[in-house]
Amino acid sequence: MATKTKAPAFGGLDRSKTLAENTVNAGPVVLDSNVTLKNPDGTGFQGGSLTVKLANAGVDDHLSIAAVGGITLGTDAGTGATIVFYNGARIGTETVSGSTITVSFDQPVSDDAATALARAIAYSNPSNTPSAAAHAVTFTAVDAEHSAISATMQLKVKAENDAPAFSNLGPVSSHILSTASQGVVIDGDAHVSNPDGTGFKGGKLTVHLSDGNTDDLIYLSQGSFSIVGTKLYLDGKVVGTVSAEGVMGHDLSLTFKSNVAISDAQMSGLIDQISYSNRSLSPEPQAKDVAITVTDTEKNSTTAHLTLAFEDRAPTIISASPASPISKIASGSFGYDISSVAVSPDATKVAFESTGDMGGTRITLDDLRTGQVTILASDLASTASFPGATDIAFSPDGQKIAFVSTASNVVAGDTNGGSDVFIKDFNTGTVTRVSTDSRGKQISGSNGDPVFSSDGTKMLFVAGVQNLPGDTDSSGLYVKDLKTGIATQIAINEANPSHATRGFNADFSPDGTKLVFVAWGDQSGPKFGGDSQCIYIKDLNSGDVTYVTAASAHQVLPVFSPDGTKIAFVSSESSVVPGGEIWGTHLYLKDVQTGEITCVSSPDGVLPNDGSVGDSFSFSSDGTKIVFSSSESTLPGNTGGVSNIFVADLETGTITRIAPDANGASSDPVFTPDGAHVIFVSDATNLVANDTNNASDVFMASIPATSVTSATLTEDAARKTLNAAGTFYFADADAKDTHAVSVAAPDGALGTLSAKVVSDMNGTGAVVWSYVVDETKVEPLAAGQTKVETFALTLDDHHGGTVTQNVSVTLTGTGGAAPMVASFALAPETTAAAAPVSGPELWAAAMASLSGVSEASPQLFDVLEKRAAALESAHAHGPAGAFEGAGTEMAHLAAQIDPAVTHVLETLWSDLSGHGAGTASAHQIADGMEAIATHLRDALHAGHAGDPLLV
């Protein structure tokens, strides 16, 4: 007869258990540390289980297994299951289903192990308002013989009165000292709650300021709560009384009525209105402790402290820009290609265009300070008409943004079916269509390629059709006056209107006097039937169009350097530089003063033919660097055959690759205004962690940049101006400060230096400075002679904190100065009998007196011409034989001098009108005077006794 098995048995289980709310709030609490579990058959529990079920469980009720009494938990590396151990030996596997825990014993389990597990069952509840109802907790054990036993515990949680709880308060409330007298909110985003859920009806708020004096005031800023006399109002309703007014350094104390409910949110809003001001005209920057005490409905109180600090920490100049890892600043969407990236002048906003597989476009604006993303325009059914062109542009002051969109709902009345240029004003929020005629009427066709003038008052754009006033040669370039609304055509070939063609991809020079643009043509100018796309410069004052180079690239986007002395462009034309390759597209830089062209994108002048530079590139603000994308194999580390981002240092020739380990193609790079960061587009997935959106994104990488506070310039007769630029970086512990820079020039400075603050955000920024001097002012320096000009640049944080950085420019002479006209005095023109001075002596004296240019220079030649006419008149009417035989020579003199003087005057006046009096070319004037001297010497023949006729 088989032996009858016995069921397992629980012993000592507490049948009724009450736990305190705050205890179970703090974490899991063991339900019964005295319970026992035994198998009377002595065979243990292998193959059995222990199940614990919590009845009527809410979302906050939790059972778990605590690590006590030798019980520990682990994870199976293969299955991920939770393993239960006793004294380090595995006893089973845990499974959880809702409010039920089961441990299946898949290993030998002794009575001691089973008992330890039963004692490890724990309960927790994070709620401060738990249910008052009892929960049945049922323990069920199954032994090795599959005999089962159950035992039940009635579990209750006793609610407790909890003190109010603060969050997001302090610990320091830091403010600028100058704002102390204006008044500041102490902490505008603090929060307080009553964990019992009963609010603050009948409660109290007290604010105490340590070391308060008669100048200190604690008050409520404007908001939902207000104080009138001794009453406290909430949205116009009396909700309490004021027992202490907070004046003269005393407490502010408010008591709520017992019959008015005050919620957690309302109490938090009241705390956020607590403000401080100091009535002293010169408050001391002494930190003060602010103690805020709140009392809830149950009369429980909590006090929180924060330090109220007022200080004005001046900015400091730092040796280099702060380094930071690559970050993603905008996420793209699947199927959309990002392009046309633009950065605002203060570096706080980034805008870009994205074009989808179905042709849809959208313009997106990201605010880097707030993280706010704005869709400026979106059209899912049409495409832009100017792919690759400049579709987005910020105004110079950063208060507006221009963009191109094919959407018809950006402004009312857009029915032309094409793309248009729009401007959004960030201050007013208004959006205006710019690509209209002078009457404000829309232009049929598509328009694009917006460029602001340097002063922000005008916009250059390409019109889709020729229906604007004055369009006589099919030019597509127009300038819109943003104040008057007048649209003016820019004729790109006034010298030969029959050579009509359409200009595009234009850019203003920094001073707004010139345009660089692309058109079909050749060295003779833009014309129909031109062999290639060429780059030209148009002078908006003189109307002259100058050939720059042939380009023949898919998209040619010429850009002026920040100082206007150079033009960067891409080209696949082999004739740009000697030895150029016909294959591949390269980035070039042309000096518009000397005509020199260099290839920026090819180290050591080697031009590969296995890759191309991207259409988009960007100068740094100081003009010392260019960032571009390229797939050329000769570039550093560029062996993968995909496009990467590179920075070329124009001073050293060094080319550096950004993100060397990128596993995807990158493009559309642009410098931030501080020159210390590059923003670009990439479909690489390893630039930042967890990049799994399978789309092109916008990234920002820091560029090692040292502060530049000096420059050396050497006199160069081939240039009209000498230029230098640099950037220095600063930090400010008062991260919310904004900064301005002023420039103090030294006495007798030959050049001028200007500066502006850029990328001023989150406690760091940069000052970009540029220096320019007329080359003729440097010419008088002897070979090797130097002149150091030191400018004091003062950075002001607008709160009294300043720091000054000197910027020095060393000018070095070469001794090659050409003479300039300062003054030239002749005897009165009407006196025929002036002191006899020979022609060679006269010109020797004139040339010896030439030193610098003055507004009197043109009069010199006028005097010279009149003097010749007077001589001729004297000969004709003088005494018989006075100048015997000289009539023919004097007539020849007049005939020769007239065109020579006229030519020099035209040249001189043209130069003066374009650049202002005093800046005419030394060489033009000197050459003109030499020409006149030659003509005079040729005309003069021996007179009486062999003397020259000129007197």
Image (spheres, grey):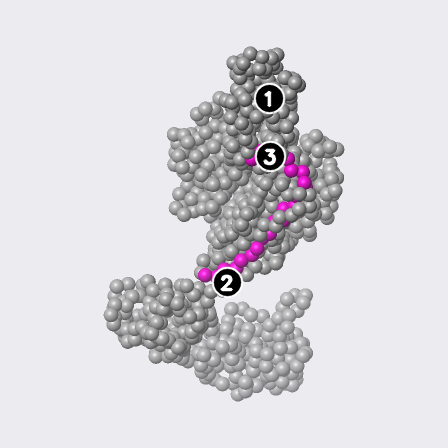
**Which is more N-terminal, label 3 or label 1?**
3
Q: Nearer the viewer, mark 2 or mark 1?
A: 1
* Label 1: element kind: loop
Q: Amino acid at mark 1?
A: Leu
Q: Is residue 118 above or below residue 599?
A: below
Q: CA distance from mark 2 to mark 3?
A: 53 Å
Residue matched to label 3: 849
Picture quadrant where residue 164 is located: bottom left
Going by the image, does 42 lie left or right of 53? right
Residue 910 location in percent, x, y? 53, 29
Indicate which disc, 2 or 3, sits on the residue closer to the N terminus: 2
Pointer 1: what residue? 950
Alpha carbon distance from label 2 to label 1: 71 Å
Q: Which residue type carries mark 2?
A: Ala
At horizontal 64% and vertical 77% (from top left) the residue drawn is: 85
Characterize the local packing of mark 1: few (<14), some (14-19) or many (20 or more) Cα atoms within 10 angstroms.
many
Q: Residue at x 50, y 40 (%)?
A: 454
Q: Position of residue 356 (x, y in %)?
A: 55, 41
**In the depicted structure, whether residue 834 falls above or below residue 751:** above
Instruction: Locate the C terminus by quadrant.
Output: top right
Foreground of the two, 552 or 604: 604
Q: Residue 96: give x, y in percent of width and height.
A: 56, 70
For mark 2, what is the residue?
314
Which amino acid does the dot numbered 3 rest on?
A: Ser
- The region drawn magenta spans 800-822
Judge from the rendering whether residue 340 lies leftward or rightward of residue 662; answer left or right.
left
Q: Which mark is residue 237?
A: none
Tell me which residue sits at (44%, 72%) in the image.
286
